[in-house]
Image (cartoon, coloured by chain):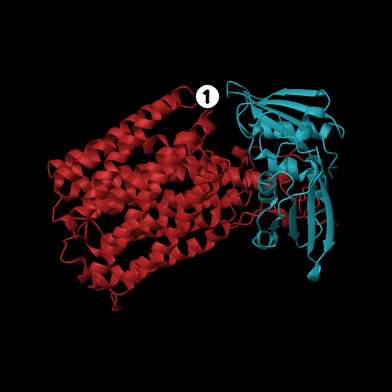
Amino acid sequence: MPMASLSRWTMSYFAAALAFLIAAEALAVAGVGFPASGLAEPATLVIVHLVAIGWLSLAMAGALLQFVPVLVNRPLAFPQLALPALVALATGLLLLCAGFAALAGWIEVTLDLLPLAAAALLAGFALLGLMLTATLLSARPVALFARFVLTGLACLAATALSGGTFALVLSGRGDWLGGAALLPGGLPFHAVLGFGGWLGLIAFGVSYRLFVMFMMAPEPPARRVRPVLIGAGLGLGLAAAGLLAPFAGVEPGAGWLAAALAALAGAGACYGRDILALYRTRRRKALEINMLASIPAFAALAAGLALLPVAILVDAGEKPIAALGFLLAFGWLGGLTLAQLVKIVSFVTWLETYAPRLGRAPAPRVGDLVAMPRTGWWFLAYYGGGALAAAALALDAAQGFRWALLPGLAGTVGIAAELVRVRRLSEIKAAERPAAHDYPLLLLVRADERSSAHADHRSTLAPRA
Amino acid sequence: MPITEAPSPRVLDVRPMLRAGEEPFQAIMDAVGALAPGQTLRLIAPFRPVPLFSVMANRGFAASDRPLADGDWEVTFSPVAGMQETPESEDLAVGSSPSAVFWGDPVLELDLCGLEPPEPMVRILEALETLEPGDVLFALLAREPVFLFPELAKRRHEWAGNFDASGTDYRLLIRHGGGKGH
């Protein structure tokens, strides 16, 4: 069905995601986590999970709830589950952080918080997976784009299940695992599946489709895109096997991890070639802020993905690996997400506010909702701080890392404030603003339920007065 | 077709969707698309969905309605014999009006292939405001205008659209449905 609806809760997902990102950056600036603590120590795990689940996963989930139905031309399945999923994920994450805080000895609560948190997170991700999988499979045949997302969702399941198992082990309830040594050996595979599979692979797949639209570039042929999915699938399959290996009595070494990452790097290289081609063949010559601000993210992807397998293989130690992981999470995934949030939020807000007025009252263009060049300066602060912070990690300058993150935090707060201003139509001149009661709500998209005086846009099913 | 052995009606209750703030038009059109030949659709709604009657009439369905308790309404859409010919192309966008083959020649043709989204949607809705009820507009687009269709439905315009044989251009016919602005 080629009818696209606006996703009701997507803005709430984005708001929660930005709040968790700002919290994670503020904690890191305050000196919590690596490099003051080790990579696998509870303090670092708090930051990593605030970023991975709170920021990146919630932002990804909000974007997928809006765009998966659009990209497969089917209505979203079980839309009523969007809010319960968000509540379960946010609750689970807060419990998880409390559990890690207990592990670190900061607070005195039972370690049973950890499996409880894992249960809430599993429930939230299961609801999300159900909505997206049912939507993707309702469109037949299953398109290549949908296979990216389905593979990513499989990685999410593996990440969440392995994380739940780790939570049981850490809380002292892992006896039933029969002595299989899952920790710490399983941690890198858990991270590869989460960052590389659920977040990375889906970012690959979605960007192919959205960038074609955003830049008016020709669609890359499937025979070029398929190797990306196959290569990444191979690497992620290796990572999943690495998680399961201890049950077969095998201990996967650094070579195993490096091989998984090398397969992902190969897929990333093919993907990078395609994205470069999209930029070069675009018909929309002037790049919008979302595509401009994505360029540093792709540079971070190239550097991080090329060097990470090498760093693992030569056993370069925690610092370079942390720096490369930071580059990928903060520079690539974080930067790309922030950049595309600007586009998604302004487009959804424009559609919600102005679609009923088009042809009947003056309407701005989508880009008019974004304050430029100010938004660009915030991105400069974000990426500048991120680059310095990655360098500080690599050079083992703990104080430098905290100072470098400060502009990154300022940039994030600035971008979040710009997104609020987009929702409030702050950049729009008075003549083009709707009546007060038709203003978009900050956290809720109400596309089809407004009665208004300025235009007759009653829903097909709305009662007649 | 005689409806002697008509299958039992398909029932769709849109009250939960409306309560959840969802737009049920898609679900209704999906249900209509999934009807067996001769099957009727029984719709339960919290009000009398008058605008839907004309949409369904265009698709060859007659409506009969009755009030239920608590102000709810039950509407039965029955297929009118001979009016359910499927559109010539199976690839027509769902929601497309099957009567499009009987529409007159377009009074306006727009080539919107080179425009950045959502400009094509803006141009089409602006052009429709200048047309009279019954006028037909033809537009050529670079992609399926998925965000335009709900707006067309709300303004009670009818449409039929599909990709051309090469799959590069999207062809869209819209007939002004007479919905008044302002």
Residue A378 in sight in this render: no
What residue is rendered at 15% in x and 50% in y?
A252
Residue A448 in picture, x, y percent from top left? 69, 52
Residue A399 in sight in this render: yes
Count of numbered circles in the view:
1
Chain A drawn colour: red
Q: Quadrant of the C terminus of chain A?
A: bottom right
**In the picture shown, does residue B148 fall above or below B139?**
below
What residue is rendered at 22% in x and 70% in y?
A176
Q: Quadrant of the N terminus of chain A?
A: top right
Residue B95 in picture, x, y percent from top left? 70, 40
Identify the image quadrant of residue A264.
top left
Residue A113 in picture, x, y percent from top left? 33, 73
Between B65 and A269, the one lying in front of the other is: B65
Judge left or right: residue A438 versus residue A341: right
Q: Chain of mark 1?
A: A
Judge left or right: residue B73 versus residue A387: right
Between A77 and A107, the one lying in front of the other is: A77
What residue is rendered at 20% in x and 45% in y?
A257
Classify mark 1: helix, strand or loop.
loop
Identify the image quadrant of residue A437.
bottom right
What residue is rendered at 71% in x and 47% in y?
A433
Residue A458 in picture, x, y percent from top left? 77, 50
Between A363 and B18, the one lying in front of the other is: B18
**Residue wearing tag 1:** A285
Judged from this view, the residue extending furthest toward the front is B4
Judge left or right: residue B86 versus residue A112: right
Q: Give amino acid for label 1.
A: Lys
Instruction: Count neighbours of disc 1 (C-alpha within 10 A) and say few if under 14, some if 14 to 19, many if 20 or more.
Output: few
Chain B drawn colour: cyan
